[in-house]
Structure formats: structure tokens, C-alpha cells
Image (cartoon, grey):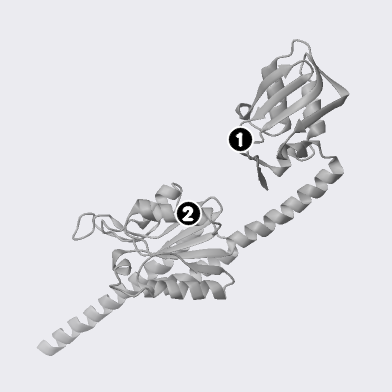
Amino acid sequence: MEYRLLEKTELWICPVELMGADLGACALAVARALDLNPDEIMVTDAIEDRLTLDILVPTVRAEQIVARRGRLLSGLAAVPGVGITDKTEVHSEGILGLISLDEKRGRELLERSRALKAQIVDRIRKRSMVFPTGREVLGGQIRDTNTPFLVESLSTAGYQAARGPALEDDAHTIARAFRRAAEEGYGLLISTGGIGAEGKDQTLEALEQVDPQARMPYILKFRQGQGRHKKDGIRIGVGRFGQTRIVCLPGPHDEVRLAWPVMKEGLQAGWDREMLAERLANTLRKKFLDRSWDGQVQLGHKAKEVVHGSK
């Protein structure tokens, strides 16, 4: 669990004897004691029997500070020119004061923090939001059947599902909506539409802005520039932003219904983004392959009829 320092980033150690001590080495010793990088802490003052340091990060994990007094003082005592006595204490006006907790109380606090973190993570994981995209939805030209279906399906699967606003075909707008929802504590975001090969389709570009490591396997590939195809294919998208999972589905309702059982299985099983993206893409590819095969069979039957009729 992380604690925000809320500008209370200063800690001081006193009484301490300083006899030609290297202040950089002092800062390094404290950084090691608190599992900080060397550039995340600095000595700001060393006057008489008081050594003052400043933590240069806005948040710290509970494990980094709770009951770390003994480790911190032992680290400082090992620095040449630094004298630590049995009266030396670590002080802070903020959350950093947890450094001085005794080990028993520290263990109890860490256990409670871990339990609380697990509850928060589970609550966030179960909060979801669905975003339809496209000017046709925004303009009311087509009825959005995907959002009601997904909200009901998610609710049945145990999620707290919310309807997000319809988003225009703009990568920055969609990316901003993804980030905002994630920051508001939604652990699952689903968008529908905007993954096609036309220039107006911008959902995957938005996903890439939010997660450069997102997985985007192809459902179909085209010759780029042919007809309305400004891109070389239709792809599915799965990514992450912090603890939030983002899934970009197609717009056609039958494809959303086809994808849902796979997505539900993947969410319950904890598939990573690569596995979930590939499974979704495979399911949707099968639809087009089946359609293509049916078309070939129908053409074959028609050809036989023509041949038979010409005899």
C-alpha cells in the first residue's frame, strides 16, 4: 500500500555526532535503509547534533518506512564520521513518523495495510465502464445496443458496471477518457467501435497513447489504401493503464456478443493482455473465416447449377 507524503517529506535524526562525515554517504545510507533510489533523498542540513534529510518522491510504500528506525540508524552508524547513541531518534511531522514504530506495532500495521490494499484492489477490479465510440452514435443515427448488453453482462458477472459517455472518433479524446476513468478507480474499461481500417477509426491509436505495450492482433488484413482502407487491417486491442485493464472491441453488435464469453473467461482466469487479445482475435477471425467458407460453398453450388442447367 502506498502513502502520500502530502509535502511532509522532511525527516531529521538527532542527537547525532558528525565528525567530518560525508553527507552524500549519509544520504545513501538512509536511501538504502528505506529502499529508495540514491537520487530520491538528499541531506538538506547538518547543524550541531541534527541531521536533516528530504524525501524527493511524493509517495512511498508502507513497507519502505514502517518500523525502519533500527535499520536506518544502523546504516548511518556504519558511515565514517557519524556517531549514533542510544538516545538518537528519527523524527518527522508527517507519515514518515511511522519509521519510529516498534517492530510489533509495525507488523500489525503492515498486516492491516496489506488487507486494506487487497480490498481496494478487488473493489477497483470489479468497477467497470463501457464507452461507445463514433459519430453515428453521438449523432443518434444508430442506436447503441452494445452498452446495454455489456453493462447487463458485466453486472451479471459480478461487476459494478457504469455507462460511459459516447466518444467522438478522436484519439486524444478517447485516450483522455480512458485515463480519467482509470484515475477515478475503474479497473476495467471497454470501448466498442473505432478499431477498423478507415481513417476515422481512432480507438487503437488512443489505446497506444495510454499503453505503448498494448496488444493489437489482427482480425482481418487488407491492402492499405484500397477503397476506404487507410490502414492495413482490423485489429483488436487490449492494454493496461496502471491497475486498469482496457479492452477495445468492434462496433457490430453480433461481434460484441461473440467476444463477450471469451472476455468473461479471460477476466475471471486473469489472462494477461497478450493472451486475452489473441483469444478475442481468434474468436472474431473464426466468424469471418466461417462466412468466407460459406460463401465459397454457395458459389460452388451455383457453379454446379449453371453447369447442370447448360447440359
Identify residue for label 1.
57
For the residue marked with disc 1, what is the amino acid? Val
Question: What residue is shown at x 53% (from left), y 56% (from top)?
Answer: 184
Closer to the camera in the image, 7 or 32:
7
The reply to whether residue 305 is in sight is yes
Question: What residue is shown at x 53% (from left), y 71% (from top)?
Answer: 154
The reply to whether residue 258 is in sight is no
Closer to the camera in the image, 247 or 22:
22
Horizontally, residue 104 falls left or right of residue 164, namely right
Residue 30 position, x and y percent, is 72, 27
Dot label at residue 180: 2
For the residue marked with disc 2, what is the amino acid? Arg
The tag earlier along the polypeptide, 2 or 1, is 1
Residue 164 placement: quadrant: bottom left
Q: Residues within 10 Å of mark 2 (few under 14, many from 20)?
A: few
Residue 166 position, x and y percent, is 38, 65
Horizontally, residue 127 falls left or right of residue 61, namely left
Q: Is residue 68 above or below residue 264?
A: above
Closer to the camera in the image, 93 or 44:
93
Residue 32 position, x and y percent, is 70, 29
Residue 90 placement: quadrant: top right
The residue furthest left is 310
Question: What residue is shown at x 68% (from left), y 56% (from top)?
Answer: 118
